[in-house]
Amino acid sequence: MNFRHFDFHAKITAGIKACKYETPTPIQEKAIPAILDGRDILGLAQTGTGKTAAFVLPILQRTLKGPRGKVCTLIVAPTRELAEQINSDITKLARQTGLRSLAIYGGVGKPAQARKLRAGVEIVVACPGRLLDHLRDKTFNLAKVEHLVLDEADHMFDMGFLPDIRRILKFLPAKRQTLLFSATMPDEIRHLAEEILDNPVRVQIAHSRPTVTVSQLLYSVDQNRKTDLLKEIMAKTVMPSTLIFTRTKYRAQSLANQLQKAGYRATSLQGNLSQQKRQQALNGFRRGEFKVLVATDIAARGIDVSGISHVINFDVPDTVDAYTHRIGRTGRAACTGEAFTFASIEDRKIIKQIEKVMGEKLVMCNGLDMCEAYQDRTPQAVKPAKKSWHKTKTNKRSGHNSSMPAFREVAVSNNNRQQKKSARKSKASSKQNRNHRAALMIDGAGKLFFNP
């Protein structure tokens, strides 16, 4: 099957060829016909399988028949990077259609966005917070929206966007086509889907497991030796393009700095950076100016950087879903990739959950000769030494060797006690003498007197 099967408009077909798309992925093959028919969609597929094109292409086809200059498609994404990525894909696919799209998100000025919105666009890709700002300011309205897409819906729930999503829904017309796409679907988002979708078509493509094109290795390593392990692996492995995930923003910046000092072309992508610097880091990594990108989970969702050869979980993620999204950054578009995970003994629980979802154990590697098989690293309780009741207990205060005969040890102990007792008496007597001397005083006439 190829894209000609969908009978897209010639201008859209030109965009497909420009992007070098040839064979539809499973999610595209199943979702595109239903969207072209106007059905609501609940699409679940692992990351890196082409979900963006699965909803963009049929929306472009339907939008070509409608009016221009009014927002008729709203796509909501959880992160700025994903919004930019979706907007970039739309721009490429719609290059010859004349349809205009705009990404709006925080971290940059609103006035420039407002001017472009008032100039007229047909597709808006937005993060929830900034979208609500524009709607409250009445920069534009959503009265003409025909297509609503919630991308990475589960992540929006994790980030606390669910209240914002409900507010956005109040600005939308009741009659519309609604599409939910995600790699995972927790129960909370499933309930939301039931509320806002009308008799949806469910498309599920092995959404709970990472892609089979990614080989996964598990390194058991103590927390304080992860950096050494990372440097050793990078020194001995050909890594054309490496994405490293950390749990915190500070660690992402710190690790990137250490790798730079070690001679690697590395940069970081994390929330403390301005939007301009975040975009520069991502674009530099995409163009190959940086061979290593150290990032928090803001880079785990929907960031389409082709040719990532390795993903390294420097810190194990908190959930199986996050692990799936992270390693899905490699092995994309039928290419192969490798994912390395650095786990300490504290990560045993989440590792077991990951292995349970995948249905198999991760391949175990020993790093820097510091560890054994991960399953054998259960801490052993330290048992107290048994008391040797047949031996005479050592008097630790004496300071003498425990090999001293018992009678000699007792004699020394008694002698020490006598010496200490005499010392206390001498000290007390000296104190009394000092008090008595201090009590003899001389009056103004030169006579001695006792001051009680």
Image (cartoon, helix red, strand yellow):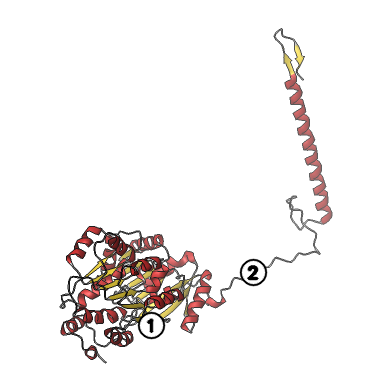
- Circle 2 packing at 10 Å, graded few (<14), some (14-19), many (20+), is few
Instruction: Tell me what residue is drawn at x 27 percent, y 80 percent.
Output: 53
Q: Is residue 402 left or right of residue 357?
A: right
Instruction: Tell me the kind of residue under disc 1.
Output: Thr
Q: What is the residue that sits farthest to the front in this orientation? A: 174
Front-lying residue, 5 or 225: 5
From this view, report whether residue 434 is shown above or below residue 352. Answer: above
Secondary-structure class at tag 1: loop
Instruction: Tell me what residue is drawn at x 19 percent, y 82 percent.
Output: 12
Residue 184 appears in the rendering: no
Instruction: Tell me the kind of residue under disc 2.
Output: Ala
From this view, report whether residue 101 is shown above or below residue 428. Answer: below
Res 211 label: 1
- Name the residue that disc number 2 marks: 381
Front-lying residue, 372 or 156: 156
Residue 247, x across and y down, in percent: 43, 65
For the N terminus, the quadrant is bottom left
Instruction: Tell me what residue is drawn at x 26 percent, y 64 percent.
Output: 280
Residue 30 appears in the rendering: yes
Residue 186, x across and y down, in percent: 44, 76
Which of pointers 2 and 1 lies earlier in the amino acid sequence? 1
Res 315 label: none
Residue 62 falls in which quadrant of the image?
A: bottom left
Residue 39, x across and y down, in percent: 31, 83
